[in-house]
């Protein structure tokens, strides 16, 4: 696995233990914030981008490498102590992210503008911290999330891609996008999405709300966007797999209504490959941008 960038270590000059008492923010705020010297203090949100191809998902696993483990390892190397990292979404093996949100508690004040580069120094090249936010002490990236945006990419051409194949599902046959968009409308709103949950999940409440679910074309790419308040295990990939069955003419568009109503996994289509799925953004109210100047 590729290691981080070479060059000057960006955490050089960061505020150390002996200096923390000189920062009044450290004394009066233990719930996150930015001190007088522009240092992040306490609770911090990381916005992460990663290529999931080499990892067994986000969540920690004993016998496999995961994104969460890599981020925790980078934090320990940077700060010299164990740091717990909690992610907003437990992306599956092979799934990518452009906007994963993870929360950490900084063990010491750290310059806000330097933290992404400092962590990236210790991360493999396929995981990057894009930016950071100071957040309230009770911030929880899971329970505070108001929704998530996913995009799924399908590549349509007779021949598969030589470059970029691990970021899309290659389907050589033409898909009927009008039929797919017609079928997707039956999924909008609040429903029991048990038909779109893979086996092995311990989730009991399978009711979710989809606000947007549609397809659009960009050259040889078909992009399927799914925005909802939350998602079941493999839900987006099963929704996509079912839409593809419609697009190939194997299912009529109005069959989607009965598939949703069935609340039974065998009623839906196959699970689309993980490589085409991207977590684009986790939605919060208020937006994390409102905490930038805390």
Image: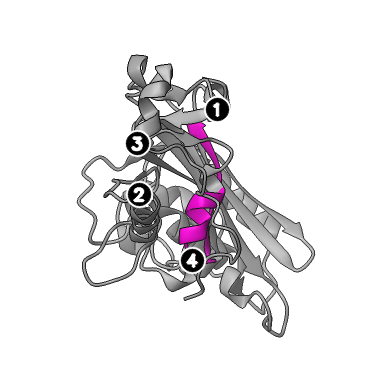
Residue 106: quarter of image: top left
Is label 1 or label 2 in front? Answer: 1
Mark 1 surroundings within 10 Å by alpha-carbon count, few (fewer than 14), some (14 through 19), many (20 or more): some
Give the side of residue 259 with respect to residue 281, left or right.
Answer: left
Give the side of residue 15 with respect to residue 42, left or right.
Answer: right
Please give the name of the residue rendered at 62% of the width and 62% of the height, measured from the top-left corner: 153
Which circle's residue, 1 or 4, is located before the other in the chain? 1
Which circle's residue, 1 or 3, is located before the other in the chain? 3
> What residue is disc 4 on?
124
Q: Which residue lies furthest to the top in this view?
A: 28
Is label 4 or label 2 in front? Answer: 4
> What residue is disc 1 on?
38
Q: Give the range drawn in magenta.
A: 117-134
Which circle's residue, 4 or 2, is located before the other in the chain? 4
The answer to whether the residues at label 4 and label 3 have Cβ atoms under 8 Å apart is: no
Please give the name of the residue rendered at 23% of the width and 72% of the height, measured from the top-left corner: 63
Which circle's residue, 4 or 3, is located before the other in the chain? 3
Within the magenta stretch, is there residue 249? no
Please give the name of the residue rendered at 51% of the width and 69% of the height, measured from the top-left corner: 275
In the rendering, at what x and y percent does residue 231 appear?
39, 46
Q: Which mark is residue 232?
A: 2
Q: Depth check: 96 or 213 in front? A: 96
The answer to whether the residues at label 4 and label 2 have Cβ atoms under 8 Å apart is: no
**Please, is residue 174 above or below residue 223 in the view?**
below
> What residue is disc 3 on?
17
Is label 1 or label 4 in front? Answer: 1
Mark 3 surroundings within 10 Å by alpha-carbon count, few (fewer than 14), some (14 through 19), many (20 or more): few
**Please, is residue 188 above or below residue 42 in the view?**
below
**Please, is residue 13 above or below residue 26 in the view?**
below
């Amino acid at each position: 696995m590729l290691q981080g960038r070479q060059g000057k270590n960006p955490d050089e000059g960061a505020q150390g233990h002996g200096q923390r008492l000189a920062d009044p923010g450290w004394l009066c705020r233990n719930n996150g914030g930015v001190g007088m010297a522009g240092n992040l203090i306490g609770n911090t949100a990381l916005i992460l981008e990663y290529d999931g191809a080499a990892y067994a998902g986000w969540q920690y696993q004993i016998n496999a490498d995961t994104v969460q483990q890599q981020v925790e390892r980078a934090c320990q190397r940077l700060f010299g102590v164990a740091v717990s990292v909690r992610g907003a979404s437990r992306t599956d093996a092979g799934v990518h992210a452009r906007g994963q949100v993870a929360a950490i508690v900084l063990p010491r004040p750290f310059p806000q503008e330097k933290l992404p580069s400092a962590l990236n120094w210790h991360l493999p090249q396929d995981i990057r911290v894009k930016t950071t936010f100071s957040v309230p002490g009770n911030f929880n990236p899971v329970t505070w999330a108001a929704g998530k945006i996913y995009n799924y990419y399908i590549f349509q051409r007779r021949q598969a891609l030589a470059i970029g194949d691990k970021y899309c599902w290659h389907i050589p046959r033409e898909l009927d996008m009008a039929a797919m968009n017609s079928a997707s409308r039956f999924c909008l709103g609040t429903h029991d999405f048990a038909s779109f949950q893979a086996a092995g999940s311990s989730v009991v409440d399978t009711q979710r709300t989809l606000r947007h679910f549609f397809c659009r074309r960009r050259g040889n790419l078909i992009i399927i966007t799914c925005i909802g308040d939350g998602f079941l295990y493999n839900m987006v990939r099963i929704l996509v797999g079912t839409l593809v069955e419609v697009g190939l003419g194997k299912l009529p568009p109005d069959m989607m209504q009965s598939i949703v109503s069935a609340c039974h996994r065998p009623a839906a289509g196959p699970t689309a490959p993980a490589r085409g799925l991207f977590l684009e953004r986790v939605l919060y109210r208020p937006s994390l941008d409102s905490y930038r100047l805390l």
